Amino acid sequence: MKKKLIAGACSLLLVASLTACNNNAATPDPGNTGGGGGEGGSKRIMLIAKANSAEYWMKVKEGAIAAGQAEGFEVSFNGPDTESEGDKQLNQLETAINEKPAGIGFAPQDGAQDGAPRLMDAAQAANIPVVIFDTPLAGSDVPIATVASDNAGMGAQAAEQLVTLTGGTGKVAIIAHGEVGTAAARRDGFKDYLAANAPGMEIVDIQNGESDPAKSRDKAQGILQAHPDLVGFFGTDDDSTIAIADEVAAKGMPTKIVGVDSSPDVLTLLKEGKINGVIVQNPFGMGQKTVEILIAATKGETPTEKNVVSESVWVTPENIDSEEVQKVIN
């Protein structure tokens, strides 16, 4: 990989893929009733996220509902309680298809990847357009688009910033939030950047926190005990980044920390100087774009681009109050 200055932006990527979802609906347009399946009778869009309560997914929901309200569509939003319930998510997707909405958005969990293509075929048979969001879905060409972040690019940007923070020498470690999907892409983007551009930096450990705060904290503690001279640490999501920051602060270590996502706890730690920087995605824009594409599909429009880039932002204690950053995190 060539070194490139990725300054303040990463990417939100729209790739060809699929999606689905369920409850928590916006107010419908009066007089619009069910019917569904992209046949013009339904004005209901259903989104199924990886989870139904985390701050990130609530921002996706807000963007989706805003896009629906702008066009008089009801938007419902659902997902499992945690991001490790693939079977439950597939059941929610199947339920959504059976309700025959005008369109479905789906953010596949790792555990739903194998079972989702069959349900994509079912959506196609019911004439329901599907858009995948957040994480690409393999094994199906049914979805009309995929709306997802450039996760490898975010990993590379995190590595570039960590090189700057550390001077490009010393031991570093990673806690990812999974083994595949977005976690793997961010992890590998980070690794590839360092391999190509920072020969003086050594990745001494990579652990999987499984999107679980307690497990992430245990992993961080173990790494720091084994490597007290660690100069840098990368967390691929908010849970891993928070766990790293808490453990580094508890040990009073000077380890530099970079991460991804902007939950309230992450932003608090950032303002306190306990995290050096995070890459903030635009989940509101992701939800908004997903629904906009689905609504356009109900009008017979085909996406003109399968890959659409939208900015995300590198946030530090120094720029967190800037207008550019505030637009994204709020």
Image (tube, helix red, strand yellow):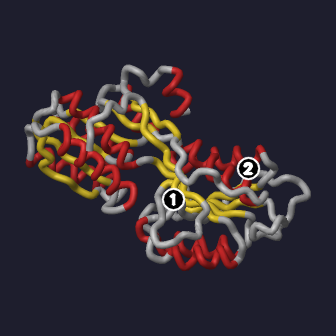
Mark linked to residue 68: 2
Q: Residue 253 versus residue 162: which sits nearer the camera?
A: 162
Mark linked to residue 321: none
The percent position of residue 209, horizontal first and vertical second, equals 29, 56
Left or right, 221 with respect to 154, comes to: left
Q: Are marks 2 and 1 in contact (CB under 8 Å)?
A: no
The residue at 52%/72% (across/down) is: 140
Structural crowding at the residue carrying mark 1, measured as other residues with C-alpha within 10 Å and reported as few (<14), some (14–19) or many (≥20): many
Of marks 2 and 1, the one in the foreground: 2
- Please, what is the three-letter code of the amino acid marked with disc 2? Gly
- Please, what is the three-letter code of the amino acid marked with disc 1? Ala
Q: State the SS at label 2.
A: helix
Quadrant of the image occupied by residue 126: bottom right
The residue at 53%/33% (across/down) is: 328
- On the rendered image, what quadrant is the N terminus found in? top left
Mark linked to residue 51: 1
Task: Tell how many labels.
Answer: 2
The residue at 77%/44% (across/down) is: 70
The residue at 16%/37% (across/down) is: 198
Alpha-carbon span between mark 2 and mark 1: 20 Å
Q: Is 94 situated above or below 279?
A: below
